[in-house]
Image (cartoon, rainbow, N blue to C red):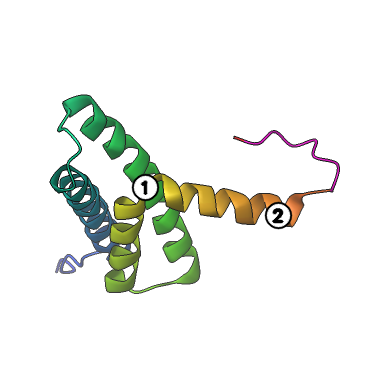
Amino acid sequence: MHMPWKNDPGIVSMIIAGFMTLLGTIASYAYRVLQGEPFLWTTLILQFFISIFAGSLMYMAAYHYGWPPEMSGGACGLAGWSGSSVIKALERRLLGKIDIGDSTLPRA
């Protein structure tokens, strides 16, 4: 007798997080276009790369802290919307924890 196949919650959570990151990216760019910024395919593609990186960082944090799929999806959607702002906030926090006071670390 074969065991029934079960969904891995990590896979489901990852799919939800990825979808929400992409949705947040599109929503953010659509909002910028509505505010008067011209639509450019190159800008949209670059925004996708930035937001996917931010969403991936957020998903790793959500996975580490054991957030449910709905919570990690929402956090990744916000990371997709915010894009580089999330990355810069995480960078400031990380560099603040390891800063040794002599400014030897390169800043972006």
Residue where numbered disc 1 is placed: 83
Within-10-Å neighbours for mark 1: few <14, some 14–19, many 20+ = many
Q: Position of residue 62 (x, y in %)?
A: 43, 65
Within-10-Å neighbours for mark 2: few <14, some 14–19, many 20+ = few
Mark 1 or mark 2: whose residue is earlier in sequence: 1
Q: Residue at x 23, y 50 (%)?
A: 28
Q: Position of residue 43 (x, y in %)?
A: 25, 30
Dividing the image into 4 quarters, which one contains the C terminus? top right
Q: Residue at x 16, y 42 (%)?
A: 33
Say what amino acid the circle numbered 1 marks.
Answer: Gly
Q: Which of the two residues, 71 or 95, is positioned nearer the viewer here?
A: 95
Q: Which of the two residues, 8 or 93, is positioned nearer the viewer here?
A: 93
Say above or below: 18 vs 74. above
Residue furthest front as drawn: 36
Q: Main secondary structure of the magenta part?
A: loop
Q: Secondary structure at mark 1?
A: loop
Q: Secondary structure at mark 2?
A: helix
Say above or below: 75 vs 25. below
Left or right: where 16 falls relative to 59: left
Q: Position of residue 56 (x, y in %)?
A: 39, 49
Q: Position of residue 52 (x, y in %)?
A: 33, 43
Say what amino acid the circle numbered 2 marks.
Answer: Gly
Residue span colored magenta: 101-107
Mark 1 and mark 2: Cα distance apart in space: 21 Å
Dividing the image into 4 quarters, which one contains the N terminus? bottom left
Q: Residue at x 23, y 55 (%)?
A: 15
Q: Residue at x 28, y 59 (%)?
A: 77
Name the quadrant containing residue 12.
bottom left
Residue where numbered disc 2 is placed: 96
